[in-house]
Image: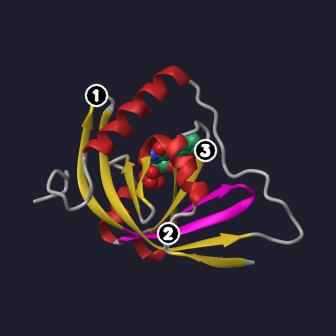
Amino acid sequence: VSESLGDRLPPSLRAALDEAAPGFTLVLVSVGTGGWPHLALLSVGEVLALDDRTLRLALWPASTATANLAREPRVTLAAVLDGVSLSVRLTARPAGTLELPSGELAVFDATVAEVRADVAPYAVLESGIRFRLTEPAETLRRWAATRSALRRLGLPGDGAHAGAP
Ligand SMILES: Cc1cc2nc3c(=O)[nH]c(=O)nc-3n(C[C@H](O)[C@H](O)[C@H](O)COP(=O)(O)O)c2cc1C
């Protein structure tokens, strides 16, 4: 049964994003052309919680997910944490691009509209989607660089922001 947790990120999700544990995976559901839900996976290397209502996402610029977000701002981010299936409804705004040695990323700042938590009495959720890094040292270096560049963009609307006019 799913219930609304309101419009703040749950502490469990903020902690997971702050901790940036490799392997923790989020599913980004965007609306594709023709209305089809489109899935992309996001690692903790590309998602920051700026506060309890704002996430900053860095997406591969050529992806369908990026094109979808630019066209339709409403997306859902899903993850399993502490035995709960969480889905976070967000409104995403394009916030410029990040030029990094590893390549370019499309940045979106996303405001939480609603968080829902789903559990079923007959079952215990043991994990969400998880992955293992094939080149951990290199990937962790890249994530650290991406996360600190995302942090340096400043808060949405403060003028230091990549998307500011
Ligand atoms: C294990 C795994 C991890 C991924 N991590 C990311 C990520 O952190 N950021 C990202 O933008 N895409 C990531 N992707 C890629 C997206 O799932 C997807 O391939 C990308 O958005 C391009 O596909 P699309 O054009 O269908 O959106 C990952 C994919 C896999 C399989």
Q: Are marks 2 and 1 in contact (CB under 8 Å)?
A: no
Q: Callout 2: few (<14), some (14-19), or many (20+) C-alpha neighbours within 10 Å?
A: some
Q: Judge whether residue 76 is colored magenta.
A: yes
Q: Which residue is mark 1?
A: 101
Mark found first going from the N terminus, 2 or 1 = 2
Left or right, 75 with respect to 120, comes to left
Region in magenta: 73-91
Q: Callout 1: few (<14), some (14-19), or many (20+) C-alpha neighbours within 10 Å?
A: few
Q: Amino acid at mark 2?
A: Arg
Q: Is residue 2 above or below residue 99?
A: below
Q: Which residue is mark 2?
A: 8
Is label 3 or label 1 in front? 3
Q: Secondary structure at mark 1?
A: loop
- Quarter of the rendering occupied by the C terminus: bottom left
At 32% from the left and 48% from the top, the residue drawn is: 61
Q: Main secondary structure of the magenta part?
A: strand
Mark found first going from the N terminus, 2 or 3 = 2
